[in-house]
Image: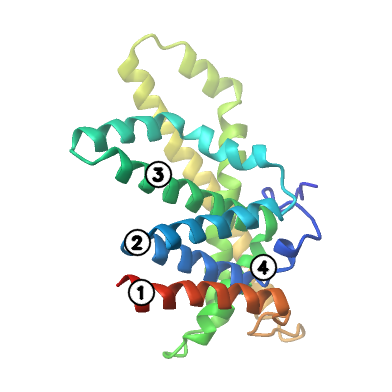
């Protein structure tokens, strides 16, 4: 079920929902790293299969994942022909597209199975492990929350702004294409400004929560890693080890 407070989060009890946010983010980095390495049939299939398993067991309708790709279908088609014209082989383009599509699917898995606050805390916890410069973790959590909130709020602010009668009338009353394009960028700038205003308001609220002395704040994420988390990490580390020993 869609959570209205976290626009893209779907409440559920699947094992993907229960995976530690830090582990899911770690898996995203591993997937991206393995995608950039030298091509190997077994490594490629295993990398894609792991993302597919996450999608399958997330209990999120497949149509939602497909919808993300459908939104950028024209961009993907144009890019395909551009790469082909640049001399890239059909096989290499198809491999690249599989990697790109499943990278988008992985982002969707994170988006649908993890709340924005959990993503922020999970990122901070992962950063905490490699925090050799003693950066303020609470400040990092606030920054990540603001970034995630911006991208979550932008579509709603855009829809609300563009549906106003004044903006709609101004767009549709113009017959000149260049004026329409100019109006589009003017409106886009205004939407960004309105979204930033919402983020700024939320930043004050988060800062108050994070630095309230009467509120107990933990630097580390509140949940401990469980069996599936360790299995997930072991699988990705095994794939990286396989590449180092066999492929490279």
Q: Which of marks 4 and 1 precedes in the sequence?
A: 4
Compared to 160, does 138 lie above or below? Answer: below
Contact (Cβ within 8 Å) of mark 3 with mark 4: no
Residue found 38% across the figure and 8% down from its top = 175
Q: Which residue is mark 3?
A: 97
Contact (Cβ within 8 Å) of mark 3 with mark 2: no
The quarter of the displayed image where residue 115 is located: bottom right
Q: Secondary structure at mark 4?
A: helix
Looking at the image, can residue 39 be seen? Answer: yes
Give how far apart the Cα atoms at labels 1 and 4 are: 36 Å
Give how far apart the Cα atoms at labels 3 and 4 are: 30 Å
Q: Secondary structure at mark 1?
A: helix
Q: Which of marks 3 and 1 precedes in the sequence?
A: 3
Contact (Cβ within 8 Å) of mark 1 with mark 4: no
Q: Secondary structure at mark 3?
A: helix
Give how far apart the Cα atoms at labels 3 and 2 are: 13 Å
Which numbered disc covers residue 36? 2
- Percent across and percent down for residue 29 are 47, 67
């Amino acid at each position: 079920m869609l959570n209205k407070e976290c626009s893209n989060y779907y409440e559920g009890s699947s094992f993907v929902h229960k995976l530690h946010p830090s582990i899911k983010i770690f898996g995203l980095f591993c997937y991206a790293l393995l995608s950039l390495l030298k091509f190997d049939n077994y490594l490629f299939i295993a990398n894609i299969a792991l993302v597919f398993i996450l999608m399958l067991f997330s209990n999120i309708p497949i149509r939602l994942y497909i919808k993300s790709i459908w939104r950028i279908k024209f961009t993907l088609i144009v890019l395909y022909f551009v790469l082909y014209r640049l001399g890239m082989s059909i096989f290499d383009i198809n491999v690249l597209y599989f990697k790109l599509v499943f990278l988008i699917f992985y982002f969707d898995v994170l988006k649908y199975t993890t709340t924005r606050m959990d993503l922020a805390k999970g990122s901070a916890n992962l950063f905490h492990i490699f925090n050799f410069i003693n950066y303020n973790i609470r400040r990092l959590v606030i920054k990540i929350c603001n970034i995630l909130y911006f991208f979550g709020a932008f579509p709603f602010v855009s829809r609300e702004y563009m549906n106003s009668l004044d903006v709609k009338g101004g767009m549709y009353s113009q017959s000149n294409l260049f004026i329409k394009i100019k109006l589009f960028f003017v409106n886009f700038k205004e939407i960004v400004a309105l979204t930033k205003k919402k983020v700024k308001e939320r930043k004050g609220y988060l800062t108050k929560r994070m630095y309230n002395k009467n509120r107990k704040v933990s630097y580390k994420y509140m949940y401990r890693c469980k069996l599936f988390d360790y299995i997930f990490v072991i699988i990705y580390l095994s794939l990286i080890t396989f590449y180092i020993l066999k492929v490279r």
